[in-house]
Image: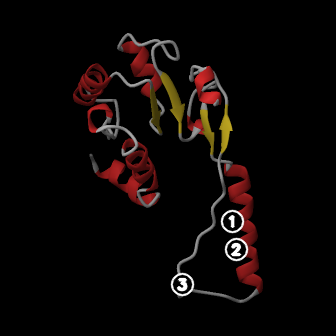
């Protein structure tokens, strides 16, 4: 992985990697699909890495934050969502109609401004002695890049 990918992983405190690892442990080792970390699909080297990974593991779906994955899947001959589904971790950065998570940026920005306003009113300045955070949950946006499978409704 490159610097930008590492930064993204660290920014979310490796929660996405951890969630993938936990789900993989539910399957026999022979059925596990390793995470493919690619910073960008702008290079032929990374495009070839994606093609090899797809050929080797044939996943049902890809979950990513890389806004050009669906385009490259199509370029490689995969039908999205016919052959493979694609879900984005941030649909705001994707082409219209992409399935995935809406990070609710507007609400997050409003919440951040309200928090900052509150700290100013309390005359709190400088670094807080305790690190704390706020989670604004994402919302699933249906889109048209994930194939619906009735078995998932169980």
Q: CA distance from mark 2 to mark 1?
A: 6 Å
Counting residues from the start of the chain, the first of labels 3 and 2 encountered is 2
Q: Nearer the viewer, residue 119 or 11?
A: 11
Q: Nearer the viewer, mark 3 or mark 1?
A: 3
Q: Residue at x 54, y 84 (%)?
A: 130
Q: Nearer the viewer, residue 38 or 125?
A: 38
Q: Residue at x 44, y 59 (%)?
A: 11
Could you say which disc has been placed on residue 130 in the image?
3
Measuring from the top left, give residue 136's x and y in whole percent. 66, 57
Mark 3 neighbour class, 10 Å CA radius: few under 14, some 14 to 19, many 20 or more: few
Residue 38 visible within the image: no
Secondary element at image label 1: helix
Mark 1 neighbour class, 10 Å CA radius: few under 14, some 14 to 19, many 20 or more: few
Secondary element at image label 2: helix
Measuring from the top left, give residue 75's x and y in whole percent. 38, 14
Secondary element at image label 3: loop
Q: Residue at x 30, y 52 (%)?
A: 3
Q: Nearer the viewer, mark 3 or mark 2?
A: 3
The quarter of the displayed image where residue 113 is located: bottom right
Q: CA distance from mark 3 to mark 1?
A: 17 Å
Quick check: 30 left or right of 127?
left
Q: CA distance from mark 3 to mark 2?
A: 16 Å
Instruction: Decide: is 29 above or below 70.
Output: below
Q: Nearer the viewer, residue 50 or 2?
A: 50
Mark 2 neighbour class, 10 Å CA radius: few under 14, some 14 to 19, many 20 or more: few
Q: Which residue is mark 2?
A: 116
Are the two marked residues, 2 and 1, in contact with CB atoms closer than 8 angstroms? yes
């Amino acid at each position: 992985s490159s610097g930008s990918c590492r930064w993204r992983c660290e920014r979310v405190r490796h929660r996405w990697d951890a969630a993938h690892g936990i789900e993989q442990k539910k399957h026999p080792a022979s059925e596990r699909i390793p995470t493919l970390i690619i910073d960008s699909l702008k290079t032929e080297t990374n495009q070839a890495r994606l093609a090899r990974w797809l050929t080797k593991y044939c996943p049902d779906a890809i979950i990513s934050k890389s806004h050009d994955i669906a385009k490259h899947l199509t370029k490689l001959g995969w039908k999205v969502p016919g052959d493979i589904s694609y879900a984005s971790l941030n649909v705001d950065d994707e082409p219209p109609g992409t399935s995935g998570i809406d990070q609710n940026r507007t609400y997050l920005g409003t919440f951040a401004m309200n928090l900052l306003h509150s700290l100013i009113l309390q005359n709190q300045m400088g670094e807080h002695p305790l690190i704390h955070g706020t989670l604004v949950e994402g919302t699933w946006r249906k889109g048209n890049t994930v194939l619906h499978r009735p078995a998932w409704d169980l």
